[in-house]
Image (spheres, helix red, strand yellow):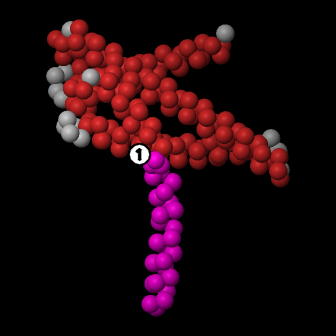
Amino acid sequence: MKRLLLTAALAAAVIAPTAASAADPAPADFKNAAKYCKEFRDGASKANFVTMFGTKKNAYGKCVSQTAKKTATEDAAQEKAAKSNAAKECKGEGLKGREYGKCVSTKAKAKKAAADKEDEAQEDDRINAAKSCKAAKKEDAEQFGKDYGTAKNAFGKCVSKTAKELAAERKAEREDATTA
């Protein structure tokens, strides 16, 4: 009985870190997150940045940590979805053996690259939204308060709404380009 429990515990110990590591941020995730957070902080202004992420002492660190974790989780999900969708497409083409493997690999890489490009565009949208909201708040603080409220999260609401609008515009432009 003790051997059975010990074996089960060892098996769980070996499996658990492998499953958890799929979404653990890599050093590159933190490096990219730091770059993004610096651009975002500069675009939003330090005061607005602090209202979104915490106190003056830890806002930048929270931004980097949250962004790196989110990136790692999204990357793992995107990679899994890319492989799954590529496998379905290649299976539908009736490929087998090496040709199937090459097909899956090629299509999965292309799908992941497209997802990464979209992620970068969304980061740019957030940075541009932060700049836009900073300008709107500076230009007419009273109207900004009416539009987004005066609570601590008002600047974040503005950034979120503006970034979504920018993403919708980008999507509409892409659709127009494909129909033209």
The residue shown at (32%, 24%) is 42
Report the magenta stretch's main SS.
helix
The residue shown at (21%, 26%) is 47
The part of the image, by quadrant, that contains residue 65 is top left
Q: Is residue 160 left or right of residue 125?
A: left
The residue shown at (28%, 17%) is 134
Depicted 142 relative to depicted 97: above or below: above
Q: Is residue 64 left or right of residue 45?
A: right
Q: Amino acid at mark 1?
A: Lys
Provide the residue span drawn in magenta.
1-27
**Front in this rendered view, residue 116 or 142:** 116
* Number of callouts: 1
Q: Is residue 96 left or right of residue 87?
A: right
Q: Residues within 10 Å of mark 1 (few under 14, many from 20)?
A: some
Which image quarter is the C terminus in?
top right
| Residue 25 colored in magenta in the image | yes
Q: Picture coordinates of residue 48 (x, y %)?
A: 24, 25
Q: Is residue 158 left or right of residue 123?
A: left
Residue position marked by numbered label 1 in the rendering? 69
| Residue 4 colored in magenta in the image | yes
Depicted 15 relative to depicted 45: above or below: below
Q: Picture coordinates of residue 146 (x, y %)?
A: 19, 15
Q: Picture coordinates of residue 131 (x, y %)?
A: 34, 18
